[in-house]
Image: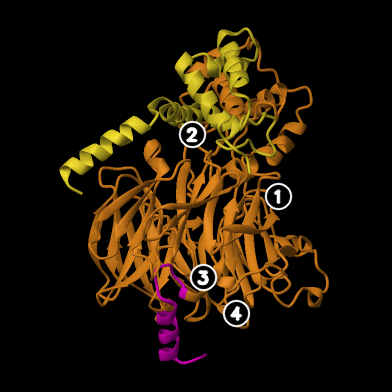
Amino acid sequence: MNRLALLSALTLGLLSFNPVNAAVIYAGKEKAIAVCSHCHGMIKPSVDAPFPSLAGRDLTYLKSALAQYRDKTRKNDLMNALAGSLTDNDISNIAAYYAGLKIK
Amino acid sequence: MKTIKRNLSPATLTRLAAALLLPFSAFAAPTDGSKIPALYQENCASCHGADLGGFIAPALNADTLKGRSLTSLRTLTMAGSFDTLMPPFYGRLADDDIRGLVSYLKATPKQANPAWTLEDIKASVKVYVKDESTLPAKPTYQIDDINNIIGVAARGKYGRGEGSKAVFINSVTHQVIGEIPTGTAAHIIDYDPANPRWAYVKNDSAELFKIDLYSMQIVRSVKTGFNGPSLGVSRDGKYIMAGSYVPHNAVILDANTLEPLKTFELEGIDPDGKQVSSDSGMIIGTPFADIFAIALENAGQVWVVDLKEGFPVTRIENVGRHLHDAFLSHGGSKLMVASYDDSIVTAIDLKDRKIIKKLEAGCVPHVGGGSVVEVDGRTLGFGTNFGDCDKMVVSVWDLDKMEVVKQVPVSGGTESPAAHANAPYVAVDIISKDRRARTVQLIDKKSLEVVKTLDVGGHAYFPEYSADGKFLYISAGYNGDEVVVYDSNSLEKIASIAMESPAGIFSHGRVRYMTRGLSPDELTKRDGDKGAK
């Protein structure tokens, strides 16, 4: 591929690509690995675990629940502690990651 | 699995600790103190040791927990430890029980090695299928070649429970064909080299299951000890040998009935001249002869057991300090044994039953199943090293000349190499405890350089090629909860198979090529050379 073709391909790629969504899910996955997956799993929680599955849950619900845990308007020692340090962006990203998962 | 006894490293859970620091007026002894040891055995022992002495997880006793606060231990137990297999027990154990457990562990010394005798083993045999002639004559599912089966040891999040199972996959279609519940975490899977229908699975509480792969069910089981990962099957498929950390013994079983035939107390004089009682390291059967080889971890000896009347033992002493695992080459006549504390791999000739040479490795060599590849007329052995140190390498040796060819720089500690005669790369799992743990690096067989790094996710480990060499399977373990399949050449992600905390991956193809990377034809040729026995 010559330079010009490469450049136009790149430009086209940039134009047709929605950077916001992709970045959100990727960043959400990173946060989920670090903060949520230990209990809720990356895909689903352990069959032996008392923790709810998050995959495929409603995006708005996930966001509001996380925000409530962070703001301690919903009480749970463990969740208040874990969500306490999340930013609004983190919450949107994590919610986008889990809401977008499809369980087979 | 990295089975090493180490001390508990302080977890970075300050944020949680602060939040969970509820009033801790008195860590009062639980009202019913007697149930705590049982709770430990039911929830903790399969990883931390029935004797509180550690197994795949740290020892938890008065000695190792000295100076640790009860609050931080309670927090760690509740929340689990990120980047390890320690799960959160929040919601699984009552807070009072967690308090009781940590108090008990802080106050209790490591227990004496409990006995588990031949009679105990015999009494533990369970028969699930009485009449094996009722089993189907061929697989009850579609599969072209039984060697296409790949078995995965799924640990389950809690190291026990419904998530703990051996999962069998058709490595052509990447579909699950069978799941065998194992109670506690499945650790090792071995296959009968003589009869394709049998597989043997050992779990983290040293229970051994005889599996009929045709009908995907347990036929028999036996408890060989309290824990210990080692397991070998003889070349004729008639005998099994299993070894334990607790207690310090190994047992030869009749593979057909799982009845114990002889136990071996593992003890001997270590390389520093001290008489020691020893954990059982790897046990291996070989296509070379009717023998088992067993590594005595602490005694630094390799014993060769002849599979004949009385099972006589030849002791090879002074092999190394803290032996662990090993792999075979040259038709199974040469055994390469990893020695943690000397940073060497010792080559042993199983014919003469003598040490050939001690070869330099990296820091803390852990060869996993090892890999041997034939490249440009040379037989190259690959050994991983799981220590974190300045010199992070994968060792490559010329196994004909028994010399070091290269120490290939990699990005971290490694636990297990995978190779296949038809695949261009030797895959090694980086296990260093940070983002690197998500990756697997690929070493080009010819150039002996790392040419690619795969970001697999989870704690990526135990790579394994399918029997045809077309696909590379990798466990995204710990919290990754999937096995990821790559095309061996393009390294594109082909499939994902969900399961809880997958660990070791074992291809049935191993019975054909003995050590991963060798061609099945090579083994046949060498078999021919020495003549059928």
Q: Nearer the viewer, residue B59 or B312?
A: B59
CB within 8 Å, label 1 to label 4? no
State the separation of the CA atoms marked 2 and 4: 43 Å
Looking at the rendered structure, the secondary structure element under dot 3 is: loop
State yes or no: residue A43 in magenta: no
Q: Inspect the image, locate mark 3, and give the three-letter code of the amino acid beneath it.
A: Gly
User: In the rendered image, what is the letter of the chain coloured yellow?
Assistant: A
- Residue A54 is tagged as none
- Mark 1 is surrounded, within 10 Å at the Cα level, by few (under 14), some (14 to 19) or many (20 or more) other residues, namely some
Check disc 3 and report the residue beneath it.
B509
The kind of residue on which mark 2 rests is Leu
Whether discs 3 and 1 lie on one chain: the answer is yes
Numbered range of the magenta stretch: B513-533
Q: Is residue B522 magenta?
A: yes
Query: Considering depth in this image, is B146 or A23 the residue closer to the camera?
Result: A23
Q: Chain of mark 1?
A: B
Tell me the residue that label 1 is attached to: B183
Do residues under tags 1 and 2 come within 8 Å of each other at their CB atoms? no
Provide the chain ID for the residue under circle 2: B
